[in-house]
Image (cartoon, helix red, strand yellow):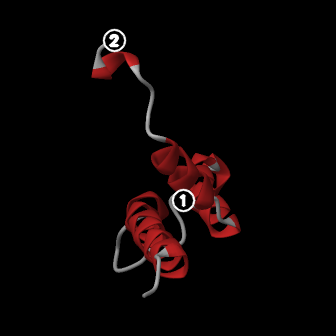
Amino acid sequence: MDESDVGPAPEAVASRAKDRSPWNWLLFVPIVVPLLTPLFNRETPRLFGFPAFYWLQFAFILLGVGTTTLVYQMTKKRG
């Protein structure tokens, strides 16, 4: 029997199962919000002369970075 025939070690499976945190559900926010096209399917309001579509794209990036950072900080193992 070859090592490649054997599945993952039981410790690895148990470790992966412990990583389920309710904080991970927040990662859906930066996925779903940019899909809501009525938010940015217009020209107004303008910000520094840029139509809403362009500056909202940058806001979505910041939303994704902020959400990912928050989830990471809340779920990282301490100690």
Q: In the rendered view of the protein, which quadrant contains the C terminus?
A: bottom left
Determine which residue is flagged by label 1.
Answer: 30
Residue 35 in the image, given as x and y percentages of width and height: 59, 46
Q: Is residue 39 above or below residue 6?
A: below
Mark 2 and mark 1 lie on one chain; the one further toward the N terminus is 2
The residue nearer to you, when weighing 65 against 13, is 13
Q: Residue at x 57, y 51 (%)?
A: 14
- Residue type (three-letter) at the residue carrying disc 2: Met
Q: Residues within 10 Å of mark 2 (few under 14, many from 20)?
A: few
Residue 1 image label: 2
Q: Residue at x 46, y 73 (%)?
A: 72
In front: label 2 or label 1? 2
- 5 left or right, relative to 70: left
Residue 61 in the image, given as x and y percentages of width and height: 39, 65
- 20 left or right, relative to 53: right
- Residue type (three-letter) at the residue carrying disc 1: Pro
The residue nearer to you, when weighing 19 against 79, is 79
Callout 2: SS: loop
